[in-house]
Image (tube, rainbow, N blue to C red):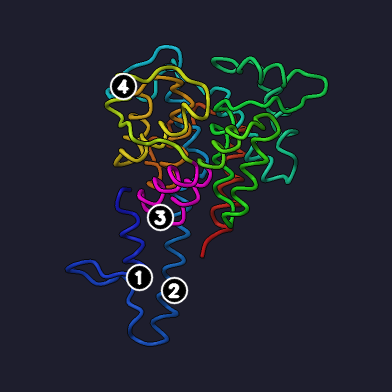
Amino acid sequence: MGDWRSWLARLHGMQKVTGSNPVFSTAKGKKHKVRGKIIFTFYLIIFYLFYFLNMLGAIIGDIVGSRYEFANIHTTDFELFTPYNDFTDDTICTIAIADALLEGKPFKDSLLYWCRKYPSPMGGYGARFAQWLHSVDPQPYNSFGNGSAMRVAPCGQLGSLGEVLKAARLSAECTHNHPEGVKGAQCVAHAIALALSGSGKDAIKQITTETYGYDLSINCAALRESYYFNETCQGTVPQAITCFLESHDFESAIRLSISIGGDSDTLAAITGGIAEAYYGIPKEIEQKALSYLTEEFKVVVRRFQQTFSIGQLP
């Protein structure tokens, strides 16, 4: 999957690859151009169907990281899926955000519905979120916790950057209405949107540091030595993005994010959402992760994939 961008570029005839020609040349007349575009579109649809399930990268990160949230492991050498893994509140909230986008309903209502339906996930809910969840009249509580960033991945799939950032803001503000809580969600969604658009890691790094002001100067090796459990956006989002930037494929991104310690499931959920948009997900990892989900979660994942992936093909 690491070479999918080059493959698509060749497929579309957008660039020359040294020693080879584009898969479908558009230089042989109008008829060939039309034919090439039709074939390209067909293969692109197949590619999206098989390699992009949108927010599944965040869900995979959550599942893999679930058993290390309160028992950190400072290595990349571990088994991804075991009987001790499960989905946590990160997955439930991500499903809620996706369902809100699908149904056109307020993010608050969707979060209340799904989280009340699954009241006791592995690891539980954060204390303040749990209070909000069980309140008679739930109101935003000025949080800058990483909950806004862990659930935002579906918002990164929307059409324009303006739509992405607006949805990310609204998805955060129903609970995490502190400026740092909103910023964390928007930064992650922005990174996902850039990755999906074909932007490189330099562009993602640039917006993270220049637009959102996060410090990415500490690498993963140093983080393993000094990082600690941190549930804020400020102490999670830049670390998760660093793990993505140092990765070479989807699996390595997940392994790096868990290896630095901290809030492992949320770090891996954030990293996984971006890594999926950039690399895609290996089929065997996708299938194993889906086996942990309830049937109604799978329905939301499939509907979201059908609605947003295919709906945005060029």
Q: Nearer the viewer, residue 250 or 48?
A: 250
Mark 4 and mark 2: span between their CA atoms?
A: 47 Å
Of circles 1 and 2, the one toward us is 1
Of residue 220 and residue 283, the one placed in the foreground of this image is: 220
User: The residue under label 2 is which amino acid type?
Assistant: Lys
> Does label 3 or label 4 sit earlier along the sequence?
3
**Is residue 22 depicted above or below 145 in this figure?**
below
* Residue at the spot of label 1: 14
Q: Which mark is residue 100?
A: none
Q: Which residue is mark 4?
A: 224
Quote the CA–CA distance across marks 2 and 3.
22 Å
| Type of amino acid at the residue the image marks with label 3 | Ser
Horizontal placement of 21 versus 40: left or right? left
Q: Earlier in the sequence, mark 2 or mark 3?
A: 2
At 32% from the left edge and 77% from the top edge, which residue is drawn?
25
Q: Which residue is under mark 3?
A: 199
